[in-house]
Image: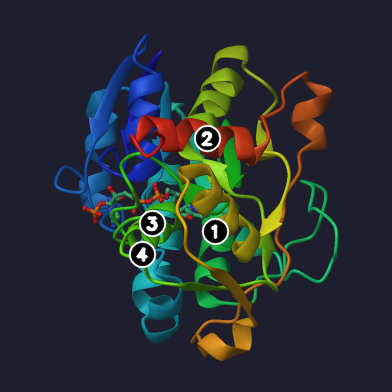
Amino acid sequence: MRIVVIGAGGQLGSDLVEVLSSHDVVPLCHDDIEVSDRKSCEQLVHLRPEVVVNTAAYHRVDECEENPERAFAVNAIGAKNIAEVCERIGACAVFISTDYVFDGTKGEPYTEEDCPSPLNTYGISKLAGEAYTRLVSRHYVFRVASLFGVRGASGKGGNFVETIVKKARAGESLTVVDDVVMSPTYTRDAALLIREVLERGLPHGVYHATNTGMCSWFEFARTIVELVGLDVSVSPIRSESLSQRARRPPFSALESPVLRSHGLAMRHWREALRDYLAAKGHLQ
Ligand SMILES: NC(=O)c1ccc[n+]([C@@H]2O[C@H](COP(=O)([O-])OP(=O)(O)OC[C@H]3O[C@@H](n4cnc5c(N)ncnc54)[C@H](OP(=O)(O)O)[C@@H]3O)[C@@H](O)[C@H]2O)c1
C-alpha cells in the first residue's frame, strides 16, 4: 500500500513511519505540508496514496483556549482539507483523535459507542476533525490518549514520562494530580494497532487505540519512578491547584469492545511503559 503519513516528524508519526516500513510510505513533515492550507494539501493528489494518515495537530490544550482560530485551522479545517482530497482521489483518510472528546462524567472507560461531549477548545476542534473525516467514504478515526513515544511530542516539547524522569534524576520531589484518570499509551503500540487495522481492512469507523488499563497521573508518575529505580518522593495533589486554563475530563480512560470483537487488544500500559523506558535507556 502507498501510505502518506502527515506529521511524520512527530511522536506517533515517526513510529508509524517505522512500523509501516514494509509498505510504500511517504513521510510528510511540517516543512512538507501545512494541513490548514488547502493548496498545500493538493500535493496529495500527485502522491497517489491509497491511505493518508493525519497525525498533525495543534494540541497544547491550554493554548488552544487562547487561540481557538489556530486550533480549528489545524485540527478541524486541516482534517477537512485532507478529507476532501482523499474523497476525490479515492484514498482512505485516517485521523488521529483524542480521549478529550469526552467530558469524563461516565466513571468507567469510554467505548466507541459513547457520545462525545468535549469540555475544551482542543476537544471540540478534534471532534470537528473527526466529523469531517467521517464524511469520507473510506475512513478511520483512531482515538489515542496520554501518549509517550521515543521521539517525544514535538508540539508539546516532550512527554510526561521524560518530564518525570528528568525531574526525578535532578532529585526534585514530585507533585502530581491524583484526581484525573486516563489510559497512558505507547505510540509504538498505537502505531502497530493502526497497521493491523489497515492491513486487515477492518470496517471503516471509529476505534479506541489505547493501551489497556487506566491510572491517575500520580499513579503513572509513581510507576515511572519505581521502574527507573529513582529515590524521590511523589505526592498526590488536586487538579484545581494547577489553575489550568482549559477544563479537562476528570476520567477519560478508553476501551475498545470493537477491536476486541475483531480479536485485537493492546497490552497493559505498565508493560508498554517498561518497554518504552528500556528503549530510552532508562532501565539499568
Ligand atoms: N500527545 C498526546 O498525549 C496526545 C493525546 C491524545 C491525542 N493526541 C493526538 O495524537 C496525534 C499525534 O500526537 P503526537 O504526540 O505524536 O504529536 P506531535 O509529536 O506534536 O506530532 C505532530 C506532528 O504534526 C506536525 N504538525 C503540527 N501542525 C501541523 C500542521 N498545521 N500541518 C502539518 N503538520 C503539522 C508537527 O510538526 P511541528 O512540531 O514541526 O510543528 C509534528 O511533527 C495528534 O493528532 C494529537 O491530537 C495526542
- Provide the residue designation for mark 2: 274
> What residue is drawn where x is 67% and y is 21%?
202
Pointer 4: what residue?
167
The residue pinned by badge 1 equals 221
Horizontal side, residue 32 vs residue 92: left or right: left
Q: Earlier in the sequence, mark 1 or mark 2?
A: 1
Q: Nearer the viewer, residue 97 or 36?
A: 97
Q: Is residue 41 left or right of residue 87?
A: left
Secondary element type, mark 2: helix
- The residue wearing badge 3 is 57
What's under tag 3, amino acid-wise? Answer: Ala
The residue type indicated by label 1 comes to Ala
| Number of residues whose C-alpha sits closer than 10 Å to that of mark 2, classed few (under 14), some (14–19) or many (20 or more) | some
Residue 90 position, x and y percent, is 46, 26
* CA–CA distance in space, label 4 to label 2: 19 Å
Which residue is depicted at the point 83% across and 24% down?
261
